[in-house]
Amino acid sequence: MSQEIPTVDVLIVGAGCAGLFLLDSLVRKGISALLIESTALGYGQTTSSQGILHAGVKYSLGGLAGDDATEAAAAASLWSKMLSGDGTDLRTVRKLADHCYLWRTAGLAGVAGMLGAKVALRTRPEPVSNDARPVWLKDVGGEVLTLAETVIDPRSLLQVLAKRHAGCIALGNVRRIVGENGLQRIEIVGGRLVSVFARQLILTAGAGNEALCKSAGIACEMQRRPLRQAMIRGPLEMVFGHCIDGAKTRVTITSDRISSDEVVWHIGGQIAEDGPRMTLENFRTHAIAELRSAIPKLNLQGCSFASYDVDRSEPRTGDGRRPPRAFTRTTGGVTIVWPIKLVLAPVIAAEIAASIAASEYPTAHWPSDVPAPEFAQRPWEVATLSWDAIS
Ligand SMILES: Cc1cc2nc3c(=O)[nH]c(=O)nc-3n(C[C@H](O)[C@H](O)[C@H](O)COP(=O)(O)OP(=O)(O)OC[C@H]3O[C@@H](n4cnc5c(N)ncnc54)[C@H](O)[C@@H]3O)c2cc1C
């Protein structure tokens, strides 16, 4: 026998950045909403995110600024409001950097890419004189720019949002989804069996959306784009930036301090896209060579290397490339969401909240004996990782 809990307007499935922003937007609008998570808060993509609040630069390299660059630029301005406490109050989210560097490797392709970035952007990158560059960028041959791209700690974001709505978030597995009398009935195993009736079921489960759609009997065209991210830990400086070559980002580096004498670099960009096709050994050699080429003054003495694989989960594009914009689609009482980027999650959440009719049900909370989820580990905290010393 399952325990029925009072009917809600919305049940959200999946507590990454998309689910948590949506819960916050709905609750602030007075909509009764609950969120269920099967593993850990942010498990999968959000905990792997580099936390860059892209302002559209990456999408406008080569001079091609499309809808995605405009969408990202608008989202970045919403973030700047939230980080100053306007709307969803994110003042306590840990900011790691308030700008990123953009620099090029030598050669004509690099120059063309930089020009494209300058022409296309609303917020223009600012040149950095040689004297004003950080030490690690001192011997870079080409132009160095700063970008108004804030970098946040994604886990701190999840913590701030989850703490605000703790009673509305539970750990459990969706067992069945059935349409019944104009509502969705969702059976959840969260320690014991609980049935939730909701006017609207919203799936923000990243890669999990595919199986959930199948349970709900609705179509779902999803693609996974595999990435292999590199990580280096040791006595490093905090580095935030993109080294570009033409329209490609060779490496994107973000950093976090993990102890008083150790910093970890989290490295994506083109190397992460190419990585899944390589052996682990070849990837390590390639990633370190790319870094040495991007940062001529690189000193990796006392450092270790590790990598991990993660998929981006997105709507299918047909050609397997990055989708142009955030995705949401409603079929009957079920909505599928893929924000595509962390930076777009609050925008899509606000749009969905605006589309939900005024509340029919009182504020809801999970029963107190249903367990709460933990926070997912950041990639460099995973105990099973193998860190190899860099010689
Ligand atoms: C390596 C990497 C770096 C990135 N860097 C950036 C960046 O710098 N800036 C940026 O804007 N974007 C970045 N992104 C993209 C961004 O991280 C994602 O678009 C975003 O985190 C997706 O969030 P989500 O909530 O949709 O999905 P996810 O973060 O994948 O969360 C889905 C949640 O649903 C849960 N779940 C799954 N199945 C079920 C189920 N059946 N029942 C209940 N719960 C379920 C999962 O456990 C998880 O907690 C990056 C992505 C990757 C992979």
Image (cartoon, grey):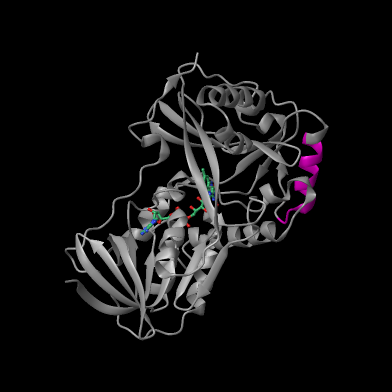
Magenta stretch encompasses residue 118: yes
Q: Is 244 above or below relative to 296?
A: below
Locate residue 344 relative to residue 47 in the image: left or right.
right
Spot occupied by residue 339 in the image (x, y as percentages of width and height): 53, 60
Who is closer to the viewer here, 1 or 353?
1
Spot occupied by residue 373 in the image (x, y as percentages of width and height): 28, 55
Who is closer to the viewer here, 50 or 172?
172
What residue lies at 37% left-to-right and 57% top-to-bottom? 160
Asked if residue 282 shows in the view, the reply is yes
What residue lies at 69% left-to-right and 23% top-to-bottom? 139
Who is closer to the viewer here, 28 or 207?
207
What residue lies at 63% left-to-right and 58% top-to-bottom? 72
Q: Is 23 above or below relative to 228?
A: below
Q: How many marks?
A: 0
- Span colored in magenta: 110-122
Magenta stretch encompasses residue 116: yes
Spot occupied by residue 97 in the image (x, y as percentages of width and height): 53, 43
**Residue positioned most to the top:** 391
Picture quarter with the N terminus: bottom left
Spot occupied by residue 262 in the image (x, y as percentages of width and height): 41, 27
Q: Is 315 above or below relative to 98?
A: below
Locate residue 328 relative to residue 130 in the image: left or right.
left
What residue lies at 42% left-to-right and 54% top-to-bottom? 157
Q: Quadrant of residue 13?
A: bottom left
Magenta span: chief secondary structure: helix
Asked if residue 89 shows in the view, the reply is no
Q: Quadrant of residue 195?
A: bottom left
Who is closer to the viewer here, 162 or 67?
67
